Amino acid sequence: MLRLLAASLLVTYTLAATAAEWRNRTIYQLITDRFATTDNSGPRCWTEERQYCGGTWKGIISKLDYIQDLGFDAIWISPVVANVEGDTVYGQAYHGYWTQDFYSLNSHFGTADDLKALSAALHDRSMYLMVDVAPNHMVSRTNPPDYPSFSPFSSASDFHPECYIDWTNQTDVEQCRLGDRNVPLADLNTEDEDVAATLYAWIRDLVGEYGIDGLRIDAARHVRKEFWPGFVEAAGVFTLGEVWHPDPNFLAPYTKVMDSVLDFPNRITLTDAFRNDHGDLAALAASMRKSQGLYEMAGAFLECHDEPRFPSVTQDEALIKNAMAWVFVQDGIPILYYGQEQGYTGGADPANREALWYSGYVVEDKPLVTHVRTLNAARRLAAAANSSFLTSPAKLYAVSQSTLAISKPPLLALLTNVGSWSSASTTWDFPDASYEANEVLVDVLSCSTVTADSSGGVLVHASCGAPQILLPASALSGSGSFCPHLAAQGLISSTLGGIRANALANGLDDAQAFFAQ
Ligand SMILES: *[C@@H]1O[C@H](CO)[C@@H](O)[C@H](O)[C@H]1NC(C)=O
Ligand SMILES: *[C@@H]1O[C@H](CO)[C@@H](O)[C@H](O)[C@H]1NC(C)=O
Ligand SMILES: *[C@@H]1O[C@H](CO)[C@@H](O)[C@H](O)[C@H]1NC(C)=O
């Protein structure tokens, strides 16, 4: 059954990245098959067909400028190992989650040298590589599964007996199969010591061979918790687990056996809060407070490959910009799913897995591209200005159904769900904001300014439902990437008046065009 593992792998990379080193990063999640092709061609890619479209690791290398220009310093790519070939009733394994051979690479995405070149190209830019791994199951086109076609687990005894999950029973969740009889996701017997040891050896080899800096762990709640510490230790790099559940109490124990989890509870309340002007920001605030008390580190996101994209819920640009902003002003590691910056609108899987080449990777005159750049830059600047920024929990103020102020000094984010067309007078009233008396604050999303009152409080009026991200003008000085026309003037108030008038006269888009050259 268990094949002896080749012990000759040379470890080519020794700088394992820890959780502390990932904390100040922001991650761009992409589907390898859908992000970029090797020759930069734009083949037909109809999501509903669920076929390989042609994206490769070399394609990613050719578009690292695009990702870096958006302000990201890490990418999360699809699983890299060989998957089941050919068609099933659910299409092909273009997403990479249907492992057939843990020790071979998915040749649709390239060669071992290509993957190493991607890792090296990222490291040359001081960027990190996060690889998705799926150790819970292996996939066959037939049922019963074709065990001999699997490697290295080629015997039925390496797997749990066939059963399908009763979601109310955690033993079932861990030991029965995801999926169905059409495409059986044969559940590895991770209670078996040999199976566990083989998976630990595999992850150690994979991380070392390809210079991987972090792992996103698929279906982490479907493996017993006791399995994970050994896996995490063998990996030796940062781990981010997928534990799908709406309740932070359910997620919390997983943060004791791996570095962090994807923040599904807040994603759910985030989507509900901004889906329309009846959403509830107080519920989002309550959800944030609850998770703050339960776990320290999570990966925060609005969209991912398993959920409908947010613009399939609402097309209101103000609501979209508010929901996107939340991801960059909360405590966890911000993650952006590729295509969000291009305003992609795909609904549930497979519609949310569009080819990015259809966008032409154009960044000019793309309001959400500008938005993402600014959000990344604002977070970076605030973290650089305050060494506690990344480790101190956000404080929440002005909490109502339609307003929420998130304070992570020196950054103050003002969110609202009234929408673009609201005529209501919406304000965030935050008398205890603790800025200096009469301090000048800049909304980096519009380059307009707000002045704190004589006791350091702020009272800000919403404009067309847009979010605002305030930073003290003093913190922007010397930062060339922000409202450079403001910074260049040393932010003296007489100059500011003129700049503000200029920004107003030219409209927000023009002001935003100054960012992140
Ligand atoms: C993250 O922190 C490290 C040192 O702790 C620093 O070298 C790096 O520049 C920081 N990155 C960002 C994006 O702030
Ligand atoms: C959960 O499922 C397991 C095995 O499938 C079974 O032995 C156990 O009795 C179930 N527990 C409950 C509470 O139903
Ligand atoms: C830095 O952040 C901490 C925690 O949020 C806060 O208490 C402190 O006032 C901040 N300092 C500055 C200078 O903004």
Image (cartoon, helix red, strand yellow):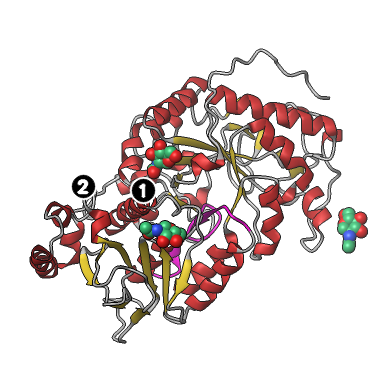
Residue 66 % position (x, y): 32, 41
Depth check: give the residue in front, 280 or 183.
280
Is 160 on the left-hand or right-hand side of 506? right
Label 1 sits on residue: 384
Label 2 sits on residue: 480
Q: Residue at x 62, y 64 (%)?
A: 293
Per the rendered image, the range of residues in magenta is: 295-316
Q: Secondary structure at mark 1?
A: helix
Quarter of the render that holds ligand 1: top left
Is 432 on the left-hand or right-hand side of 150? left
Q: Are marks 1 and 2 in contact (CB under 8 Å)?
A: no
Q: Quadrant of residue 370?
A: bottom left
Residue 163 % position (x, y): 83, 51
Residue 338 % position (x, y): 42, 49
Residue at mark 1: C-beta within 8 A of ligand 1: yes
- Is residue 121 located in the magenta-colored stretch of the structure? no
Mark 2 packing: few (<14 Cα in 10 Å), some, or many (20+)? some
Q: Residue at x 55, y 42 (%)?
A: 19
Visible residue check, residue 325: yes
Depth check: give the residue in front, 210 or 412.
412
Residue 137 % position (x, y): 72, 41
Q: Quadrant of residue 216?
A: top right
